[in-house]
Image: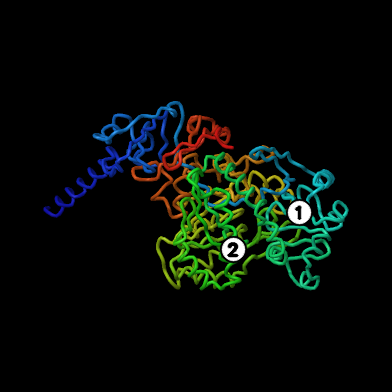
Amino acid sequence: MAYSLRVSCLLLVLALSACSQKGDDPAHSFSGSDVRVYIAKSVITMDAVRPRATAVAIDGDRIAAVGNMVEVERALSGQTFHVDDRFADKILMPGFVDPHLAAILLPMEFITPHDWDLPGRQVRAVRGREAYLSRLREYEDSEDGADWLWTWGYHALFHGELSRVDLDAIAPDRPLVVWHRSFHELYLNTAAIDALQLDQAAVEAHSQADYPSGHFYENGLQLVIPGLLPMLLQEERYINALREARKVIHAGGITTIGDAAFGVLDMERELESLTLAGWNTSLNPFRTYLIIDGKSMGEVKGHERVRRIIHFMPRRDLERIFFARRQVKLFADGAAYSQLMQMSEGYTDGHEGEWMMEPGELLEAARVYWKAGFQINVHVNGDAGLDAVLDILQILQDEHPRGDHRFTIHHLAYARPDQARRLAELGGMVQANPYYLWALADTYAETGLGRRRAAGMVPLGSFAETGMRIAFHSDFTMAPARPLLLAWAAATRITAEGNILGLNERLRLQQALRAITIDAAFQLGRDDEFGSIELGKKADFTVLEQDPYEVPIETLKDIPIWGTVFEGKAFPLQHDD
């Protein structure tokens, strides 16, 4: 009885302590500078203990108190503070997190199957072979002074087949690079092939390249990327793209991003360009976490060496740019946009998927990072690809059991319910791109997957049922860098043609909003720093004009964004250059 009483008293003390910390927020150690209190129509905290508030106190770059005004004033007793009411009619949410985003495609001419709304320009969709070739010809005619021509967005199922003959007819004298919508493929005209001095025999010997058509895909890109690098990373071109990306990211209400393919081009040049483009200044309204592309670097340096490099990279952290601690990115099957993902039932037209890393190769690489305690992120799209990755994760767990390993599947274009259960049992997670369903399901229902599998693309409901934490990413430009759009796609499962597919795979609104805030921060390993509005965390907020819980779910993506608060400083969108 005495033991039971002591336990009961201990539990009561712990409960009172928790209530004190969450209710009165007394634990903040003040910096001595003035404290600002933002009041809002509502504060959506993503904190289960206190899901809503109306006031947030900020001391420097940290949250000093959360609650109603009476509670915040009590927490600030004896402290100098002033009230800022600019958000009195607005909604504050935790700053949005996009854990997988890049920007290299921005300086290219967009000719795409869907509309794009970018800072300072709008791109209208192009469909059909003749319309595509006509638009490509217009682009060539408009670029009189350019040495090389670059375009992005081509997709055979929307634009028809394309070959080197077509490109030579449009640009017989200047190199022309047509980058596929997936970024995993490109087409070159003869002038580009000649300029790169490609060896015909080497191209013809590669299983993922076709010399006559000028088509290079998946690992076949390695034949051309080294020659394209000097132009892709040309200072003015690349830095302008990164500056434009800053505006794109801010417009989406994003305060933290992850670059989940860092080093795929040239690590030192990429890092230098980010700093030159202003990503590391105090005026930049978001932070960046860099996740090393272990596949690309491992092929050159070996995975043991890459493991050591990643281990020590955080020593090079900057003010706004950080290296993700003990994380690496690996790759399994091909791109969803290319229909080169590995599918267990194949494709309806008889073509086959591709591997970026064969399962045996992937296992050997993953084993190096797993034993060192790394979080492993794997690009995988098809269910056959996921089967291979789950087998690898099982082997790793059998060989060297680990607990909170956060092994994360990236993209998840198609999977089966049994795979959701198996991933959960193995302790894995999903970081998905719900935009795939919107952009591709209608077309893939007619060609490649068929209606049943197209309706089951990005099956997040099955994974959420297991209790797994799910995050969303744009993988910009695989989707617009708009987290609310991703949440809308997952919660509605509406396609580009207005169809609703796979109702049982919808996420609830709360799940979808967690996937762009606290659960995305969790997958970056930084949920203790941001992702929710709680005492001691970074003062990062996305400022909305409407409450996402009070508008029809069909309009979630259309909620206007006022701007952001990043580490306590307000950044309204209207002040962007």
Q: Which disc is residue 129 wearing?
A: none
Task: Answer above or below: position of 470 versus 91.
Answer: below
Q: Which disc is residue 331 wearing?
A: 2
Which residue occupies the foreground of this view, 7 or 219?
A: 219
Give the mark nearer the N terminus: 1 vs 2: 1
Instruction: Report the residue marked by disc 1.
Output: 178
Give x and y (percent) for residue 77. Answer: 24, 34
Give x and y (percent) for residue 575. Answer: 55, 34
Q: Nearer the viewer, mark 1 or mark 2?
A: 1
Give x and y (percent) for residue 376. Answer: 50, 62
Residue that appears at 52% across and 72% down: 305
Q: Quadrant of the C terminus?
A: top right
Name which residue type carries label 1: Val
- Where on the picture, by quarter, is residue 63? top left
Label 2 element class: strand
Task: Answer above or below: position of 175 versus 255.
Answer: below
